[in-house]
Amino acid sequence: GNRQKRLIHDLLDTYNPRARPVTNDNHTVGLKLTIRLQQIMDVDEKNEVIQTFLILEQMWNDTRLAWNETEYGGIKQMTLRSKLIWTPDISVLNSANKDMDLREKNIRLFINSAGEVLWMNPLILHTSCGMDIAHFPFDNQACELRFGSWSTSLRYMDVHPFEDTANLQYFVENGEWILESTTSYRKLKKYGCCESEFPEVTYVLELHRRTLFYTMNFILPCVLIAVLALLVFLLPPESGERMSFGVTVLLSFTILILMLQAKLPVSSKVTPRIAVFYWSIMLEVSAGMFMACLMLRFYYPEQSNAPLPGWVKECVLNYCARIVGLKKTAERVQ
């Protein structure tokens, strides 16, 4: 009503939104911030980027916006557009997009009669997150959300986390990742350009991957293919299907490797254990194909112009047959 219009006029008539909310230029603006984490929308291992939806809450005191409630009909709180008053130049320091100036949005701020300002800013963030894929898909990741100012040093503004953890009251769980914990801490960082230190607040998201999808689609098929590779030796040589069966198994395994490569980032810093497992199975399948070729060569010696060397017969029918428990079969062949 008229009282609120009069209040806004009285507060903003001589208000300078470019000036810091301090009574003395030597004083520092105290800023507290916290995040209300709503959802982890995506974790892109390939590009090492995490996408989150959250509400960034910033709180500070501006004595120029304080008023006497009795003089304005008992008004205790009101809202103002962010462009009308001073707001902190907080940015997302590890943003994967262009530098985000949160002041670009003209959002309403909550102000009470004591001059306390609350700025609630809904954001969809894309932030960089270095991935440790050594134990993929049974891995844990720690992703950081870093907030601070690029231009306002500790001399003019100090930033502290409002709480030790993120607010998870309305958090929606992700289908692939479990949010195990969140922590926050403040640190001072010094850049080569300036003598002063710059405060920043970091929230760490501890994530654990849900493994059911990857077990069913990456690990079990690999184990089944490894078992099928051993069945090549059960096929009778007369059928002529040993080589075609082995090649089919090898092609199936190649498709699995391509699917895995499409999921993981290109990195030479660490080799995922699942990649080591895949290549071990690949060697097993290749060795099986090689042995199948030798067996067919032994089974059809008449199709080759050169007879089998005597040492090969001696090695296979005497030594190898004893190792695999086929001594009697070897004696019948001899």
Image (cartoon, rainbow, N blue to C red):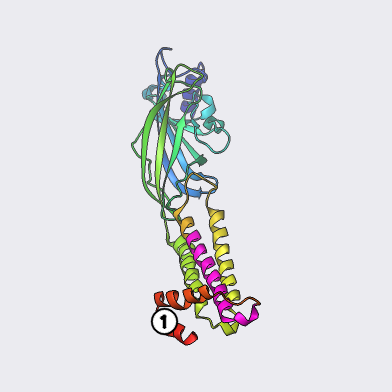
At a point 64% along the width and 80% down the height, the residue shown is 303
Residue 139 higher or lower than 29, as above or below: below
Q: In the image shown, does 19 or 198 lie closer to the viewer?
A: 198
Name the spot of residue 283 as percent of width and height, x first. 51, 63
Verify whether residue 299 appears in magenta: yes
- Residue lying furthest left: 164
Residue 114 in view here:
yes
Name the spot of residue 310 as percent of width and height, x first. 53, 75
Classed neighbour count for the residue bearing mark 1: other residues with Cα under 10 Å, few (<14), some (14–19), many (≥20)? some
At a point 43% along the width and 62% down the height, the residue shown is 212
At a point 57% along the width and 38% down the height, the residue shown is 97
Residue 88 higher or lower than 22, as above or below: below
Q: In the image shown, does 21 or 101 lie closer to the viewer?
A: 101
Name the spot of residue 239 as percent of width and height, x first. 59, 84
Q: In the image shown, does 328 or 18 lie closer to the viewer?
A: 328
Name the residue beneath numbered marker 1. 327
Verify whether residue 197 appears in magenta: no
- Residue lying furthest bottom: 332
What predominant SS class does the magenta segment belong to? helix
Q: In the image shown, does 138 or 28 lie closer to the viewer?
A: 138
Q: What is the magenta range? A: 278-304
Question: Which structural element holds mark 1?
Answer: helix
Residue 161 in view here:
no
- What's the residue type where badge 1 is placed? Lys
